[in-house]
């Protein structure tokens, strides 16, 4: 299996059975995200204590890329500080927008590297980053994000 197949499999898997899907009852933050280009909508729920993302979940509906990205993001940021999550967003954003196809993903990204392929499809980048923009809103105290 080459890397592209592996990446494809991760996306299909996380779209079919999204991790951390649903609401957290004792959330401290939540924000909504909407990508008008594709119609993806999601709500992100966070429980942050002493600056650490103790729990995170999402619900909503969207295309495979948006759902898989949100699922992978929740796995990637749980247990991290808000600051570390913002840094991961920066790395992820770079991964999906960089034009040099041979750039090696930052090791911190882990499975999130599976979304590197969207860089070839500019409209899909909005799908892949929706959850992250929503996270950014939640962390900065705004209650909604819209990608455009
Ligand atoms: Zn989408």
Image: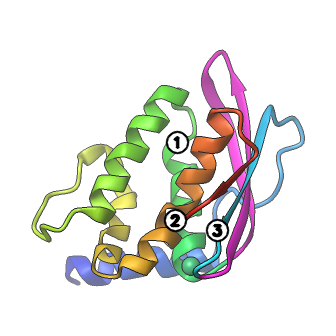
Left of 126 or right of it: where is 17?
Answer: right
Residue 30 position within the rendered picture, expressed as x and y whole percent measured from the top left: 77, 43
Label 1 with label 2: CB-CB less than 8 Å: no
> In which quarter of the view is residue 103 placed?
bottom left
Question: Helix or strand or loop: what does disc 3 sit on?
Answer: loop
Q: Which residue is mark 1?
A: 77
Q: Residue furthest top?
A: 50
| Residue at 76 percent of width and 45 percent of height | 143
For the view shown, which residue lies furthest in the front direction? 148
Query: What is the crowding at mark 3: few (fewer than 14 residues within 10 Å), some, or many (at least 20)?
Result: many
Mark 3 / mark 1, whichever is N-terminal: 3
- Is 51 part of what is drawn in magenta? yes
Q: Secondary structure at mark 2?
A: helix
The residue that appears at 29% across and 54% down in the rendered structure is 94
Q: What's the distance in space between the residues labelled 1 and 2, CA to CA? A: 12 Å
Question: Which is more N-terminal, label 3 or label 2?
Answer: 3
Q: Residue at x 36, y 54 (%)?
A: 93
Q: How is the image coloured?
A: rainbow
* Magenta span dominant secondary structure: strand
Q: Which residue, given by chain and number where applicable, does mark 3 sit on? A: 18
Q: Is residue 58 magenta?
A: yes
Beta carbon of the mark 1 residue lies under 8 A of ligand 1: no
Query: Which element is circle 1 on?
Result: helix
Q: Position of residue 11 (x, y in %)?
A: 46, 76
* Cα gap from disc 2 to disc 3, whole angstroms: 9 Å
Using the image as rendered, state which of residue 137 and residue 47 is in the foreground.
137
Mark 1 / mark 2, whichever is N-terminal: 2
Q: Residue 32's spot in the image, x, y percent?
A: 74, 55
Q: Which segment is the magenta one?
A: 38-61
């Amino acid at each position: 299996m080459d890397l592209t197949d592996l990446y494809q499999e991760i996306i299909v898997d996380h779209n079919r059975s999204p991790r951390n899907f649903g609401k957290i009852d004792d959330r401290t933050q939540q924000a909504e995200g909407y990508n008008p280009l594709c119609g993806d909508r999601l709500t992100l729920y966070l429980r942050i204590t002493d600056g650490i993302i103790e729990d995170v979940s999402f619900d909503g509906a969207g295309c495979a890329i948006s759902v898989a990205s949100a699922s992978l993001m929740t796995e990637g940021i749980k247990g991290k500080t808000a600051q570390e999550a913002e840094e991961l967003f920066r790395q992820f954003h770079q991964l999906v927008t960089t034009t040099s196809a041979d750039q090696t993903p930052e090791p911190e990204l882990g499975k999130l590297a599976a979304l590197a392929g969207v860089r070839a499809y500019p409209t899909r980048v909005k799908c892949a980053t929706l959850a992250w923009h929503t996270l950014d809103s939640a962390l900065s105290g705004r209650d909604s994000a819209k990608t455009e």
